[in-house]
Image (spheres, rainbow, N blue to C red):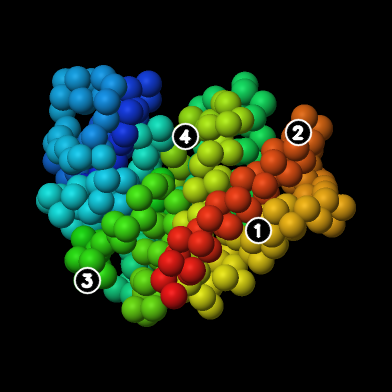
Amino acid sequence: MKRDLPKVSIVIPGYNCEKTIKESIEACLNQDYPKDLYEVIFVNDGSQDRTKEIVEKLPVRYFEQNHSGPAKARNRGFKEAKGEIILFTDSDCLPDKNWIYSLVKNFDSKDIGAVGGSYGIKNSKNLLADSIHAEILWRHKRLVREVKALGSYNLAVPKKILLEINGFDETYLTSSGEDNDLCYRLLEKGYRLVFEPKALVYHYYPEKIFSYLKHQFWHGYWRVKLYLKHFKMIKGDDYSNLVDYFTPILAISFQFIPLLLTDLFRTLKILCYTKKINHFFLLGIIFLRDFYRGTGLFLGLIKFLLFRL
């Protein structure tokens, strides 16, 4: 059995992650997978806190770079890796002990380019975190085995395929859009993407609304770059759909009634799934998110479209 298992490298990029990185790495080190068949690589993306001090005490391979974004950090990590399959996760994620095996078992065909998994939650007592998690689970429950996009927080890709497509696009400077771009390029090469819901990483979601909304601003901003490059994917990629990009436009054009009705309908669908009345809180979160994504979308259009003309 062991001789049939591939050698694996886990790559974690991190920036100012002193609060969670020790837990994340320890979860990676405690996998139910032969210890001689996997390694953990951490790439410090120019952290200014105690991240380096913490990680250097742990039995991982450590690399660092000037602050350049997670895409470049992941590329550095996989290029240094010794494994034939590269597993990516984030510095605020704690993989389940069966995570490695749950992902690699799905590489049962040469045309499978990537396998990705789902989220668990570490801070469910926080209403904001629990509500964000509820929406993600609602989206994941709709996914079938073969999908069009996977997230880099829980992703496995053979190293030779990463080299073939030149890894992540390093011009994405924050953590939004670079994983979609990678997946879309895999599809263009004829590879299949597999979603494995049993492959879990337990995530520390944002507990403060501004932290979450700041990320949503960058989500809107980088989507402009993403869809200018992959225009045919604007209609959706299983996880997202046209509504996700229509509502931010409603928000910044102050079309409040159709925006509120659309957000209310989505919130009610999530409530029907979770059956938790406190998740009605999502209505306010989604409403605010639309404005932040819309603002990012507007500035992204100026940056990536107008300045390119």
Residue type pointed to by label 4: Tyr
Q: Earlier in the sequence, mark 1 or mark 3?
A: 3
Which corner quadrant of the image does residue 89 belong to? top left
How far apart, in angstroms, are the residues tagged by discs 2 and 4? Answer: 22 Å
Would residue 265 be visible to someone looking at this image?
Answer: no
Could you tell me which secondary element the residue under label 2 belongs to?
Answer: helix
Residue at x 34% of width, y 28% of height: 17
| Mark 1: few/some/many CA within 10 Å (<14, 14-19, 20+) | some
Q: Earlier in the sequence, mark 2 or mark 4?
A: 4
How far apart, in angstroms, are the residues tagged by discs 2 and 3? Answer: 44 Å
* Residue 244 circle label: 1
Horizontal side of 264 relative to 211 (left or right) equals right
Q: Is residue 108 above or below residue 27?
A: below
* Residue 164 circle label: 3
Could you tell me which secondary element the residue under label 4 belongs to?
Answer: strand
How far apart, in angstroms, are the residues tagged by discs 3 and 4? Answer: 30 Å
- In percent of width and height, residue 59 lies at 15, 28
Residue type pointed to by label 3: Glu
Task: Give the mark toward the camera: 1 or 3.
Answer: 1
| Mark 2: few/some/many CA within 10 Å (<14, 14-19, 20+) | some
* Residue 202 circle label: 4
How far apart, in angstroms, are the residues tagged by discs 2 and 1? Answer: 18 Å
- In percent of width and height, residue 167 lies at 26, 62
Would residue 39 be visible to someone looking at this image?
Answer: yes
Could you tell me which secondary element the residue under label 3 belongs to?
Answer: helix
- In percent of width and height, residue 81 lies at 15, 50
Residue at x 41% of width, y 47% of height: 175
Q: Badges 1 and 3: C-beta atoms under 8 Å apart? A: no
